[in-house]
Amino acid sequence: MSGHSKWATTKRKKAVIDAKRGKIFTKLNKEITIAAKSGGGDVAGNPRLRLAIDNAKAANMPQDNIERAIKKATGELEGVTYKEFMYEGYAPGGIAILIEVATDNKNRTVAEVRHIFSKAGGSMGETGSVAWMFEHKGVITMPVQGKTEEEILELVMDDGAEDLEIDEEFIEVVTPLEAFENVRKKLVDSGLEVENASLQWIAKNSVKVEGESSEKVVNLIEDLEDNDDVQNVYSNANFEEVE
């Protein structure tokens, strides 16, 4: 799959069972809050909120947490206002990095992100410096559930799915933005369990990373993901050969 790496895909697939569940809930809580703030607390009229709630439930986030996040966003409870930003930069070896953040303090967040880059031997870039290397796509990940690649393709190709990757445990379907909701709905309506569905930045072309460089890039990405304000990290690194 163009722009994908085994390391990045595995990280994404394992996200809902990651040991750092508290951080995952923090990121999910922010997404629900932002979605409800921007589009209202009614899921019937807010597709982004519906998707955020579905992902939160797939990660076993308690219903009370979900409801509290919505109420904070709609003003029923006192809460924090988050704003979304995208930062760009380079990991060691010139690997392109895109970072989506949601923060209540932009100055704090950009300083922390810059420090993480600097510590790892990378650097932050100007707006647009690496974004052109990525495409915005819908990505749907789910367990195999006894389905073959041919069965899934037959199910979703007419709805606009453009790529599919399958291994022993997971299926990953990639769609254009405009087909994302139709494909997701088709899978759900077919009785399949969707573990995660989200809009992601997929690299147009990947760059192979090996040896010491791969360790540095992995450590940088993991440090970024550990930051509470960072929602998602994308790169064009190909770790296919990295154990």
Image (cartoon, helix red, strand yellow):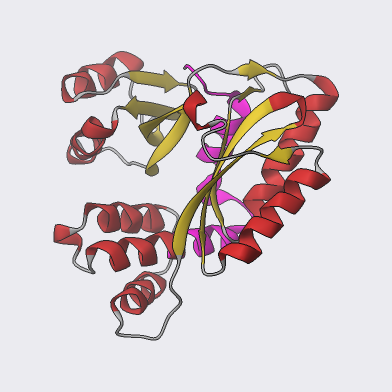
Residue 15 % position (x, y): 54, 46
Q: Quadrant of residue 172?
A: top left
- Residue extending furthest toward the front: 126
Q: Nearer the viewer, residue 207 or 68?
A: 207
Q: Quadrant of the C terminus?
A: top right
- Residue extending furthest toward the right: 212
Q: Quadrant of residue 165?
A: top left
Residue at 20% of width from left, 61% of height from top?
Answer: 43
Q: Is residue 107 above or below residue 59?
A: below
Residue at 20% of width from left, 58% of height from top?
Answer: 46
Q: Nearer the viewer, residue 85 or 30?
A: 85
Q: Nearer the viewer, residue 158 or 102?
A: 102
Residue 59 % position (x, y): 45, 55
Q: How many marks?
A: 0
Does any portion of residue 239 appear in the rendered image? yes
SS assignment for the magenta stretch, majority: helix
The region drawn magenta spans 2-29
Does any portion of residue 169 appear in the rendered image? no
Residue at 71% of width from left, 50% of height from top?
Answer: 114
Q: Is residue 28 above or below residue 179?
A: below
Q: Is residue 151 above or below residue 140?
A: above
Residue at 69% of width from left, 45% of height from top?
Answer: 222
Give the side of residue 129 with respect to residue 41, left or right.
right
Residue 207 % position (x, y): 64, 17
